[in-house]
Image (cartoon, coloured by chain):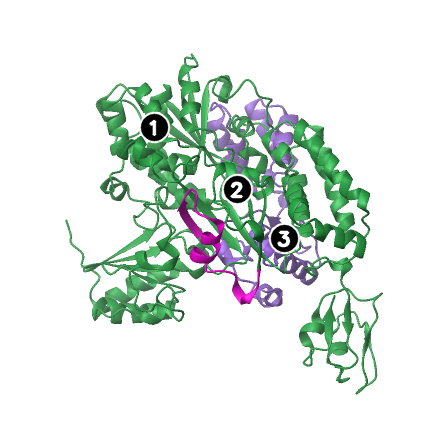
Amino acid sequence: MGTDCACCSDEKSKKLLAVIEAEKNTPGSLIHILHEAQEIYGYLPLEVQKTISEHTGIPLAEIYGVVTFYAQFSLKPKGQYRISVCLGTACYVKGADKVLDRLKSELNMDVGDCSEDGKFSLDACRCIGACGLAPVITINDDVYGRLDESEVPGILAKY
Amino acid sequence: MQIYRAHVLVCAGTGCTSSGSTVLFEEFEKQLKDAGIENEVKMVKTGCFGLCAEGPIVVVYPEGAMYCRVTKEDVAEIVSEHLVKGRIVNRLLEGAGEVQKEEAAAEQSHFFKKQMRIALRNCGHINPENIDEYIAEDGYEALGKVITEMTPEQVIDVMLKSGLRGRGGAGFPTGRKWDFARKSPSDKKYVCCNADEGDPGAFMDRSVLEGDPHVVLEAMAIAGYAIGSDQGYIYVRAEYPIAVKRLQIAIEQARAYGLLGKNILGTDFSFDIELRLGAGAFVCGEETALMTSIEGHRGEPRPRPPFPAVKGLFQKPTILNNVETYANVPRIILNGADWFAGIGSERSKGTKVFAVGGKIKNTGLVEIPMGTTLREVVYDIGGGIPNGKKFKAAQTGGPSGGCIPASLIDTPIEYDTLIEIGSMMGSGGLIVMDEDTCMVDIAKFFLTFTVEESCGKCPPCRIGTKRMLDILTKITKGQGTLSDIDDLYALADAIKSSALCGLGQTAPNPVLSTLRYFKDEYIAHVVDKKCPAGVCKDLMRYTIVADKCKGCSLCARNCPVNCIQGEIKKPFVIDQDKCIKCGTCMDKCKFGAIVKE
C-alpha cells in the first residue's frame, strides 16, 4: 500500500463519512456501515475502524469485536482476483477439497492468504447455493462449476 | 395491453446465472430482433425452475417446452425452429436422450410429476422484478382479505388450524408462535424473517427470494397484522446478491403501490419492512443470535427464556419465521386451513422444499408433500445415483442433522419420523452419498464446520466440538483406539445437554447418527486401520500389482514426488514412505496395474 495508504485517501474517507452520517442514527446500523466501508476500502484496516468509532461513538473494542466475528469482514487486503472455493456439503461430496488443494499448490499459498503481487487471494467459503454445479469456485464475479482439479491451471491462466 | 403469441422464460436464479443464463437472455433478444418477431415474443427473466443440474434452463410457452443446458449457439435454433416455425427442438428437451422425447410439457416430466408446488408456485413462472405479475397470480389478495375482512384472532386461528410448522428446522407450530406474540403486551412489536440460510448445501430460501420475493413481504405484513406490529426486518445473507437486489426492488414496488407503508389499502393498518444483511456467520441462523446481529452486535445467542415472543429484537416481542414458512402463508389464507391440513401426512402438514444435491442425477430444488418417502425423492424425482453407484445414505438437516442409511430409504419424510431415526427435517438440504463417501470423513466435515462457526460464547460448544473433531481427525489418520469411540459418545452427551443454543445442542448429531448406522466404518478405521470407502488418505496405500505391470515407466514419469522406481519392462515399485497418495499413477496406468486399498 505504501504512501497512498487507502485510509488517507480523501475521496474514500469522504465517502465513508457520508455513509456514517446517513446511518449513524439508525438502530443497529454498525454491520451495514462496515459492509459499506469494506466496499469502499476493500478491507477494514484499524484506521477505518477508528474513524467509524470516532464518528458513531461506538467503542473501538466493540467494532473490532464485530469485525472479527463475521467471516465476511477482513482485516487483511484482498487480491485483485478473489478466489473463493465453495466448501458446502454438496461441493465437498463432489471433491471440492481436491480442487482447493490444487489451487493451494498452484498458487503456493494457503487459505486466507493474498499473493505478494496482490493479484490473487484465496478463500474457502460456505455454500453459495449453486449446488447443481458442484464443485464450484468463484473468481470475483465469475463462476466456474462442475470442476475437476485438472482444470485449475487453465482457469488461473485466464487471469 | 400488448398480446404476445409466445413467452420465453429464462431462469435467472443463482444456479443458472452461474451457468451462463444472462448471455442467453441477450442472445435471445438479438435473435428475435433479427428474425423480426421481437414484438410477438415476450422475454421474461424468472426465478428457479428447480432443475439446477440441467441449467441453464429456458422454457417456451404456450407449449411449456423445457430446454436444458442451453448454450448460446442453441439460441438461434430455438428461435428459428420453435418460435418461427413452431417445431419443438427435441434434442434440447428435459430428459432428451433418455426416455420420453415426446413429452414436451414441463408438467409431465418425471422430475416434476411427484412434486407439489405451494411455496415455489410462482418460482420460474413469474418475473420476480415485476409486482404486476405477482398480483396477477392472486398476489396481495390474502393481505387485502386479512386486513379488511378478518380480525387478528381469526388470522391466528387459521394458522393454528392449518397445522403449519416452521420450515427452518425445529418445526415449531407457526400459529402458536404468532399467538404468543399477539398476547405479549407492548407498545412496539417486530416481525422478522430469517433468510440467513446457512446450512451448507441448502438453497431453498434463496430460490424463493430470487423467484418470488413478494410472497415473503405479503406474508410478513399478514403476520404484522396478526400480532399487532408495524415493523418487519428481513435478515438476509450477504452471500446472496441476487436475492438481496430482488428484495430491494420488491420492497420499493410494494411501497409505491401502497402495499407497504402507512395505512395499507386505506385501512388503519401500517407496516413497513427493512432489509438487514448478514456478514457470514452460521450461528446467526439461530433466532436469538439473528436478533442480536440485527441490533448490530456480534451474533451471539442469548439464553431462553425469555423467548423472543416476549422479549426479542430490541427487547420487544418479536416473531421470527423462515422464508419458506412465510411462502406458505398467503395460500393458506386464500384456500383455507382445511385445504392445507388436507395435504401431507397425519403429523406433518403441507409440503416441504428440499435442495437435493451430492451424488444424484437431478440436483436441484424439489417440493414434495410431507410423507413422501426418501426412495421417491432419490429415485423417482432425483433420477437415482450417477455412474451406476450404490446409494449409501442421505444427509438431512445439515450440521444439526444426520444421515439416513439405505436400509431406511422407505422412511416417510416427516418432522417426527426423521427425528426418531436420528436425523431431522432441518431447513431442507438433502445431500445424497454413494459408496465412495466415507462416513467418518463426513462426520469430520460437519464437525470442522461447527468448530469454525461456533460463536464461542458457551464452553460445551466451543471446547466440546473441538475435542470431538480432534478425536475424529485422529481416527481418520489411523491413530484411533476403541476408547476414542466411547469418548465421542460421552462428549456428545455432554454437549447435547449443556450447550446454550439449538445449534450447539445439535452439533454432535452428525457424529451420533453416523455412529448409529455406520459403526462398522469407525471400527474399520480404528481396528483394521482401513478406510472402506478409500477416502482417508492416511489409511490408503497405492501398490503396483507385479503381474499386471508391463514396466512402461509411465507412472514413474508422472509421479510428482518421484517415489516410483524400477527397470523398464520389469514391475515397478512405489516407495510408501515418500508417496503423497495423489493418485496420479493410478489415473495414468493403462494396464490397471495400480490398486488403491
> Which three-letter amino acid code belongs to the residue tagged 1?
Ala
Q: Position of residue B560 (x, y in %)?
A: 75, 70
Left or right of A105 in this view: A44: left
In magenta segment, residue B383: yes
Same chain for the residues under marks 2 and 3 in the image: yes
Looking at this view, is B123 or B177 the one in front? B177
Dot 2 or dot 3, earlier in sequence: 2
Q: Position of residue A137 (x, y in %)?
A: 56, 56
Look at the image and tell me whether residue A119 can be seen: no
Q: Colour of chain A?
A: purple
**Labelled pair 2, 3 in contact (Cβ < 8 Å):** no
In this picture, is B399 found above or below B321? below
x 51%, y 26%: residue: A28
> Which three-letter amino acid code belongs to the residue tagged 3?
Ser
Letter of the chain that mark 2 sits on in the rendering: A
Q: Which mark is residue B330?
A: none
Q: Quick one: SS at disc 2?
A: helix
**Mark 1 lies on residue:** B221
Same chain for the residues under marks 2 and 1 in the image: no
Q: Which chain is green?
A: B
Q: Which mark is residue A121?
A: 3
Q: Position of residue A16 (x, y in %)?
A: 52, 35
Left or right of B344 in this view: B390: right
**Mark 2 lies on residue:** A39
Q: CA distance from mark 2 to mark 1?
A: 32 Å
> Which three-letter amino acid code belongs to the residue tagged 2?
Glu
In magenta segment, residue A21: no
Q: CA distance from mark 2 to mark 3?
A: 16 Å
Q: Which residues are magenta?
A: B365-390
